[in-house]
């Protein structure tokens, strides 16, 4: 008999806490993503997992995304949802390129 009130109380806490957790950080700031990707590229070049050509190409692509982010922020002062989604998609693609290039078997000798 005590299980039902405890279960309902637990469900009440779970539903009350879920929106707070979901809205805590819906998007990682783009600047943090750029820093993390840059660290991964630099680490890959230092360790030899990325050769210099791959590292240079990935760094240039990262700089291009950062320039685009700057242009977006200058156009209206803030990033709107479409611009943020575009940047997130571009960072996702670049992140997967870094992962692929680090594990493609090409090594710096």
Image (cartoon, rainbow, N blue to C red):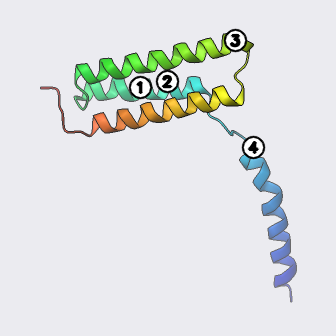
Task: For marks 4 and 1, give the CA distance.
Answer: 27 Å
Name the secondary structure under disc 1: helix
Residue annotated with mark 1: 39
Name the side, left or right, on which 100 lies relative to 52: right
Q: Tag 4 or tag 3, which sits nearer the N-term? A: 4
Residue annotated with mark 2: 35
As drawn, the label of residue 75 is 3
How many marks on residues?
A: 4
Residue at 24%, 32% (x, y): give it.
Answer: 49
* Residue 72 pos. (x, y %): 64, 16
Q: Quadrant of residue 40?
A: top left
* Residue 62 pos. (x, y %): 44, 20
Quick one: label 2, few (<14), some, or many (20+) residues within 10 Å?
Answer: few
* Residue 93 pos. (x, y %): 45, 34
Name the secondary structure under disc 4: loop
Task: For marks 1 and 2, give the CA distance.
Answer: 6 Å
Name the side, left or right, on which 106 lies relative to 23: left
* Residue 83 pos. (x, y %): 64, 26
Residue at 44%, 28% (x, y): give it.
Answer: 37
Name the side, left or right, on which 52 lies relative to 63: left
Residue annotated with mark 4: 23
Quick one: 107 or 12, which is closer to the camera?
A: 107
Q: Tag 1 or tag 4, which sits nearer the N-term? A: 4
Cβ atoms at labels 3 and 1 below 8 Å apart: no
Task: For marks 3 and 4, give the CA distance.
Answer: 26 Å
User: Could you tell me which quadrant the C terminus lies in?
Assistant: top left
Name the secondary structure under disc 2: helix
Q: Tag 1 or tag 3, which sits nearer the N-term? A: 1
Rendered position, 22 above or below 34: below
């Amino acid at each position: 008999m005590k299980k039902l009130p405890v279960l309902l109380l637990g469900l009440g806490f779970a539903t009350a806490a879920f929106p707070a957790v979901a809205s805590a950080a819906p998007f990682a700031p783009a600047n943090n993503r750029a820093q993390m990707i840059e660290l991964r590229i630099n680490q890959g070049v230092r360790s030899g997992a990325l050769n210099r050509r791959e590292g240079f190409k990935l760094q240039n692509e990262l700089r291009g995304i950062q320039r685009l982010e700057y242009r977006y922020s200058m156009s209206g002062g803030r990033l709107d949802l479409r611009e943020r989604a575009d940047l997130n998609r571009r960072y996702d693609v670049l992140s997967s390129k870094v992962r692929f290039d680090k594990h493609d078997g090409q090594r710096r000798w």
